[in-house]
Amino acid sequence: GAVVSQHPSRVICKSGTSVKIECRSLDFQATTMFWYRQFPKQSLMLMATSNEGSKATYEQGVEKDKFLINHASLTLSTLTVTSAHPEDSSFYICSASLVQGGNSPLHFGNGTRLTVT
Amino acid sequence: KQEVTQIPAALSVPEGENLVLNCSFTDSAIYNLQWFRQDPGKGLTSLLLIQSSQREQTSGRLNASLDKSSGRSTLYIAASQPGDSATYLCAVRPSYGQNFVFGPGTRLSVLP
């Protein structure tokens, strides 16, 4: 089955620094990947849609300059949290599907727990 | 705007029981619906995907049904086991090309 790998699984950083999270599709090519944020005991909030070779599409209220997304290849998308602050501490999850918008299931990475001190 | 709800928010059952998790959506015009499982601190694992033209999907002890007209889907888990303890989320894709809309999840605890 389709596998999505996310790295790192946990990261602790100091306030003001930047953190990069990687999302890879291991056995399929994903022209589109999705980045979500999840607060404790809450459901997933879509942050942005990452499109290979073009700019990401951000959801309303998500700061583009704060959460930089790069989708440079068909198997890799990165999310960089710039100038991180404690309120950015959260669980970030990426996902991808074999066919964008079609009938194939959405597959998720294992998430990244970000703690900003 | 499509909204997805799940009831109950939490459920605790003894091992061996059959159980049903509920998912409701406000707009019956959907493209497909997917059920996921999430273990604490982990990502989501896809369980079942139901297309809008289907009534149900089965995988092992899991059976998901879809009733578009009433805006409901159920996930039936047979002979529950402690390993089934997790949060179960349903997600609706409103139309082709649109992103999934997630429900808040049901936190299931199966007691040995």
Image (cartoon, coloured by chain):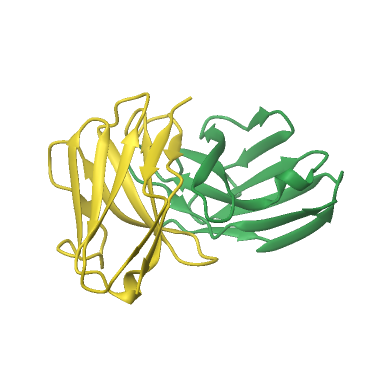
Chain in green colour: B
Q: Colour of chain A?
A: yellow
**At 54% from the left edge and 34% from the top edge, which residue is drawn?**
B49
**Left or right: residue A44 compared with residue A19:** right
User: In the depicted view, which residue is nearer to us: A6 or B92?
Assistant: A6
Q: Is residue B21 above or below residue B33?
A: below
**Left or right: residue A50 compared with residue A44:** left
**Left or right: residue A109 compared with residue B80:** left
Q: Quadrant of residue A17?
A: bottom left
Q: Quadrant of residue A59?
A: bottom left
Rendered location of residue A29, percent (x, y): 29, 26
Q: Is residue A74 above or below residue B74?
A: above
Q: Tell me if I can see residue A86 in this picture.
A: yes
In the picture, the quarter occupied by the C terminus of chain A is bottom left
Rendered location of residue B104, percent (x, y): 54, 60
User: In the depicted view, which residue is nearer to us: B21 or B26?
Assistant: B21
User: In the depicted view, which residue is nearer to us: A42 or A40?
Assistant: A40
Rendered location of residue B51, percent (x, y): 51, 32
User: In the depicted view, which residue is nearer to us: A15 or A46?
Assistant: A15
Rendered location of residue B67, percent (x, y): 62, 42
Q: How many marks?
A: 0
**At 65% from the left edge and 38% from the top edge, which residue is drawn?**
B65
Q: Tell me if I can see residue B97 in this picture.
A: no
